[in-house]
Amino acid sequence: MPKLLASTQRLERRSLRLDTLLTLRWLAVAGQAMVIVVVYHGFGYPMPVGWALAAVGISIWLNIALRLKYPHAHRLTNTEAAAILAFDIVQLALLLYLSGGLENPFALLFLGPVLISASALPPSTTVYLGFLALVCALVVAAVHQPLPWAPDSPLRLPPLYQAGVWLAILLGMSFVGVYGWQVAEETRQLTDALTAAELVLAREQHLSALDGLAAAAAHELGTPLATIATVAKELERELPAGTPHGDDVRLLREQSNRCRDILRKLTSLGTDEAPFDRMPISLLLEEVAAPHRLIGVSVRIERLADRSSEPVLLRNPGLLYGLGNIIENAVDYAEREVVISIRWTPRDVVVTVVDDGPGFAPDLLGKLGEPYVTARSPDRRKAAAGDQSGLGLGFFIAKTLLERSGAMLTIANRVPPEHGAIVRIGWLRAALDEAAAEAAALSSELQDIS
């Protein structure tokens, strides 16, 4: 997980694609050129059209230069992206200077580069660009050419109005910048957390696949190894005792027997971890809870329904990891006991994990399950083991994997005077039965093929 987060941080330094920025800049160039032509030729308003088109031409030249210099898939560094956006701010200020300053309604476009920076670049870069935009807006408010208008009735807006426009730009930049950064940051965190969940699931699936491969290898190697053992035994009978060759053959037979014992263990692993294994939900929970009974907290499983109709679940890595993480969290916080109750009806299946710890903090109840939200104190984070500890990803990964199996999670605290946390995991019975039936049919087909 640390390697994943480090690689993500490296990518964020080159997070803005050149193609994306060039597409936006070409749209801006087209819009600026069209407005200049319409105002000068369509409305016939006087303005320094040559200088204005020259400013647009500089943007065109920069777009072409960037396209020729970099490949299509190039990602800009923060410095490169900030320099381009700063140029756009200055170029817009030049156009506004030539066309009325803040009297020009297109002064609102100062928000564009700031929004792009807020969604893709670090906050410090956005602050610098926002400050540059505000300074440029202040300059063009004080010094600018007349607003293109009818010569016989020129439009002059009072300074107080222009000050209001500048203030509106300031407030707009603040709101848009903070909102854009917040949305982009939440998206990045969710993407990183989902990637972490995929890595955990892939690791669990890889371990299961290794068990299956080990069983297959043991099955294939069993026959030649038996042949080697038989030949070694025959040679040992033929050679006189005490000769060097006799000792070598005896050693060969002993080592072949040792190899057979190792292969027998590998075969048992493959049998226990079959890819399409199914088991009653109580046995699955017993397996998940067993490793957590060794740390001094009682873990008790209760069945609250008729055992004859107990549902059968697929024993897949995602389900095991998700249930194991929730039980592990309960054991970490429990004082003496964790109770896992199972209730099933023809309609649904519900697993409830209850501990007698301090419970969830009220301000976290609505946030648990989101990435990078953790209920661990700093001391618990330091003492916890595992790559995801303290990052707030463990519960998020567990929730994601369980929801993929069709589960729905609810989180609450016990009602006072009792204390502790309650995590309830529910499935629709029909969905579980259907998945188990499909897996059984597929397993049967594979056995027929083999």
Image: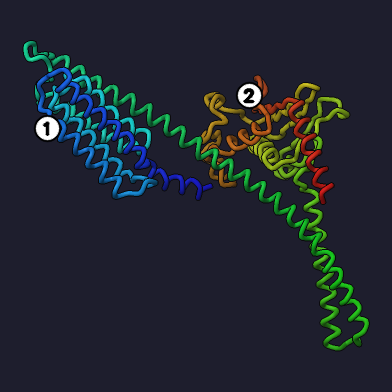
Residue for badge 1: 51
Residue 86 seen in the figure:
yes
- Report if the CB atoms under discs 2 and 1 are less than 8 Å apart: no
Q: Position of residue 33 (x, y in %)?
A: 21, 29
In this view, the residue in front, 409 or 92, is 92
Q: Secondary structure at mark 1?
A: helix
- Mark count: 2
Q: Nearer the viewer, residue 437 or 117?
A: 437
Mark 2 surroundings: few (<14), some (14-19) or many (≥20) residues within 10 A: many
Residue 213 pos. (x, y %): 73, 55
Residue drawn at point x = 27 percent, y = 31 percent: 28
The residue to which callout 2 is attached is: 413
Secondary structure type for disc 2: strand
Q: Is residue 241 above or below residue 159?
A: below
Q: Mark 2 or 1 closer to N-term? A: 1
Q: Residue furthest front?
A: 41
Gap in Å between the C-alphas at discs 2 and 1? 68 Å
Q: Is residue 296 visible?
A: no
Amino acid at the residue labelled 2? Asn
Q: Nearer the viewer, residue 341 or 307?
A: 307
What residue lies at 68% left-to-right and 27% top-to-bottom? 424
Q: Is residue 259 above or below residue 244?
A: above
Looking at the rendered structure, the kind of residue marked 1 is Trp
